[in-house]
Image (cartoon, rainbow, N blue to C red):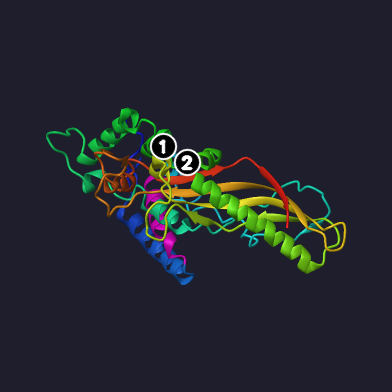
Amino acid sequence: MPPSHQHREGLRSRKADAGAGKTEYGAVVLLTAALVAAVFAVDVAGNTGALYEQAFCRIEQGEDCDGPGSPSDEDVETRREAPEPPAEPGCEPLCEPYPGWTPFVQWPGVPGNHPEDSIALESILDHDSADVDDVSHKTIFTWPWTVLESKKQDAYIWAQGGAMKGMWTARRALLHFLGGSGDDFEVDANEIMEDVPEFREAVERQRREIAREAVRQAKERGEKGVVTFPVRSEWNAFGYGPDGKYVYDDSDWINTLGSWNYAETGEVRVIPPTEPGGEWSYKMTTMTHVKKYYDWDRDKTGPAVGFGPIKSPFSERDLSEMHRTGLAQEFWVVGDTSPTTSSGTL
């Protein structure tokens, strides 16, 4: 498979159009030292390396230099970026209600502060942080590749072949990882609901709890007319039981996600009884959002993927090292269900 990544090259070497004299270099060193001192004085030490590089480049090449604010194409492809700022926090799970039946133009966004945000940030900083030749070695069996690069070929062939037959989503996710883009990988959360009945039951249970809470709050507020609550739950975990084992047995989703987090957004309308002592009713329309960070454990040396007797010839450690050397890249898995409407009386 042709490599789908670019190895880190470090600072690019540049040839000067004309050499600089010792006097000029000495002046630049003194000037740069003064600038660095000023930088540390305002606690922006992270800019020091950039100042040094820019100063020496200017002496060698004049104005034709890459500096802060003007990255080259290679820099753009290998830069480290922190995750986007978190969305609005949850409303636990109901936001402030509005009177009447008026539908919302836009539902609340997904909750921020995902439980795996710190894992994602660490992964971003770790990606392409080591050279493959420093991590792995070549053998007569893998030449001209290192052992790790050969493992990547094994993973690609294994995913493309029949070993993952029936695990179509897990296969696509592994190929996406090997492709190295780091882009979000979208899944159909409706399929998860259909394939994993235990997850569907957990979501339906949460929806019933939200409906009960909406009716309780409407009663507590003494509402006399219809009120509509925006819904935005916190992230909830699914996948593992108290014993640390999976609570479901779908091999495709186990090898794609394992465990994941889910949240609910939408709206629930509460209708007071028309007669004293009558039943309160509700009508709720919500979507379920699934989110998981797809990463590999560097401490695990057993087969990374597989189910039953079929096990992969590469380990989680191998895949984690592929991420660290830029041969592959970890990513977010995201998915939403279609809006679902339910109603009832309480």
| Whether label 1 touches label 2, CB < 8 Å | yes
Residue on which the image places disc 2: 183
Q: Secondary structure at mark 1?
A: helix
Indicate whether 175 appears above or below 58.
above
Find the magenta span and give its range. Answer: 44-63
Quadrant where the C terminus is found in the figure: bottom right
Q: Name the mark on residue 278.
A: none
Residue 20 lies in the magenta-colored region: no
- Residue 44: image location, x then y, percent: 46, 65
Residue on which the image places disc 1: 176
Judge from the rendering whether residue 94 lies leftward or rightward of residue 260; answer left or right: right
Cα gap from disc 1 to disc 2, whole angstroms? 9 Å
Q: Secondary structure at mark 2?
A: loop
- Residue 289: image location, x then y, percent: 57, 47
Quadrant where the N terminus is found in the figure: top left
Q: Residue at x 37, y 60 (%)?
A: 243
In-front residue for pair 109/102: 102
Indicate whether 334 appears above or below 282.
above
Q: Amino acid at mark 2?
A: Asp
In-front residue for pair 33/277: 277
Q: Residue furthest left?
A: 140
Judge from the rendering whether residue 81 lies leftward or rightward of residue 86; answer left or right: left
In-front residue for pair 249/6: 249
Q: Residue furthest bottom?
A: 41
Q: Amino acid at mark 1?
A: His
Q: In front: mark 1 or mark 2?
A: 1
Classed neighbour count for the residue bearing mark 2: other residues with Cα under 10 Å, few (<14), some (14–19), many (≥20): some
In-front residue for pair 35/344: 344
Classed neighbour count for the residue bearing mark 1: other residues with Cα under 10 Å, few (<14), some (14–19), many (≥20): some
Q: Residue at x 78, y 58 (%)?
A: 280
Task: Determine the main secondary structure of the stretch shown in magenta.
Answer: helix
Residue 62 lies in the magenta-colored region: yes
